[in-house]
Image (cartoon, rainbow, N blue to C red):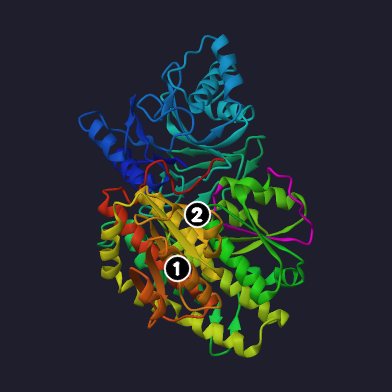
Amino acid sequence: MCGIVGYIGNKEAYPILIKGLHRLEYRGYDSAGVALLNGTLNVYKCKGKVADLEAFAKDKDKGGTLGIAHTRWATHGEPNDVNAHPHYSQSGNIVLIHNGIIENYAPIKEELKKRNYKFRSETDTEVLVQLIENIHDNENVPLAEAVRIALNQVVGAYAIVVISKDNPDELIAAKKGSPLVIGVGDKEFFVGSDATPIVEYTKNVVYLEDEEIAVMSRDGELKIKTIKNKVKTPYIEELEMQLEALEKGGFPHFMLKEIYEQPRSIRDSLRGRLNVNKGIVRLGGIADYEQAIIKAKRIIIIGCGTSWHAGLVGEYLLEDLARIPVEVEYASEFRYRNPVIHEDDIVIAISQSGETADTLAAIELAKSKGATIIGICNVVGSSIPRATHAGTYTHAGPEIGVASTKAFTAQITILTLLALQIAQEKGTLSRNKFHELISELNTIPDKVQAVLERNKDIEAIAKIYKKAHNALYLGRGYTFPVALEGALKLKEISYIHAEGYPAAEMKHGPIALIDENMPVFVIATQGASYEKVVSNIQEVKARKGQIIAVVTEGDTVVKSLADYVIEVPKVDEHLAPLITVIPLQLLSYHIAVMRGCNVDQPRNLAKSVTVE
């Protein structure tokens, strides 16, 4: 989850590293640090955000054309100055930054203590840099070889970058289970947890594979070998990312910008895959496995957080339209409960970043059982697309805000296309209904735009409930996962306790919480369960609960019952999640801003969860 940056070349390293940290701060912001080699090895680090690091280093020596930097999401050891990265070896000659977890750090640490190594921090990372120095000194091998030998002794996940006072012309990086990208310039190299710190300087990148070590030299040479000492040829790819996508574009927060980008991101996810005039839905990335999906007796969808909620919508769609049984699993629990997996199962893995550690682990388990794995993710070149048999990119564009918004609707868009494609091929959907749905799907970006134009009304409602301590979210059928997602957004960024439930489950327990102070957000758009939802609303009102309802334009029944309503355009209930989630995202955003919360970087969270 941490963000790491490295540079070697002919430019001053510090400005590149700091700008890179700002771009990666969504990955962690408990502490930050930088190491610069300029004759001497200078390490500056502190608790807090990248801005705190800049203030700390303001009057210090920041020269040098070789350096590494880190922004941390704490795993081992509390966030403080000492536990911040980079960590340096006992002699102070070697420094290292790390994203991941070294699981067997404790026995290695005990062995190093016996060899008179002293430890300053509580981190597993310091153990690794001490181990590298121990091997480097005792076995009298080059630094890159010491890194290789050390990595053969550790268990866990890592993306590391290492520099040494004795190696002023080399930058060394390695990865296993955590992402790492190398930018290739003209006799200069950039390293990042993802491409965001790199895109400004070069479009040429190398994505390191697991258990690979890269040695970047100041003369422009890039060498890659595995930790088993097998030499690999670097494969240079061209970045598709645009620099403008990484800026706020006049919005006060990335989250608001990304909410407003959803008409475009949904349209981009549809482009080239949906042809209404010809009546065609085609996800090219799954073409080779289409028949396997059609014949599947079961589909398993795995994801975490918002991606899991998108998977729940996918369950409704695939079962309803394509008539294939679907199970939706938390990736974090999947491999720990000894799941039954058959060779003819289709496993759909959903992840915004494509680096989610729990999802990657679940993929490997399913692959080992012979299942076919389909990936749905947003980041080109990330680990999940490389680990799956086939898949589809969402084309949502970079999502910087930690609380996911446009990734959710893009994932649902892809799942809708998948369900429609399979239903069409299986013949489980009438021709008329198929054309009705694809025609309406094509209008969704405009309908999302119409909801966004109600932002001021939604902000006014947010002002009323900004001091709430608890909230309930209710939905039925296709909108039940939206209730879960709405509750997650509120607690993620405003720190208000919120829970989502199927509306009919309210009377099986949660109704005990309802009183005159409890806001209850209900998705009550037109659909098969509309009358039932109306009854659930009446149950809340009978107990003096406050109802904020998302309703179809022109609704009068719910409007007469609710305290406040937010109208959305009429839409087929199969597509309702794409519309009804938008006001819930805006409500959460405005409430968080009014409460003075850091919307883009909520406490204790990070964007890309690359540790288990």
Q: Is residue 352 magenta?
A: yes
Q: Which residue is mark 2?
A: 510
SS of the residue at dot 1?
helix
> Left or right: where does residue 396 sit relative to residue 358?
left
Of the pair 89 and 348, the residue shown nearer to us: 348
* Residue 284 percent location from the top left of the image: 61, 72
Above/below status of 535 relative to 196? below
- Residue drawn at the location 44% of the way across and 52% of the way down: 513
Q: Does residue 22 lie above or below 563 as drawn?
A: above
Res 274 seen here: yes
For the residue labelled by badge 2, is the local secondary structure a helix, a strand or a loop?
helix
Where, by quadrant of the figure, is residue 519 drawn?
bottom left
Location of mark 1 (residue): 537
Q: Amino acid at mark 2?
A: Pro
Q: Position of residue 301 (x, y in %)?
A: 64, 59
Q: Position of residue 28 (x, y in %)?
A: 41, 42
Q: Which residues are magenta?
A: 336-356
Q: What count of labels does the image hold?
A: 2
Residue ID at (52%, 45%): 179
Q: Is residue 530 magenta?
A: no
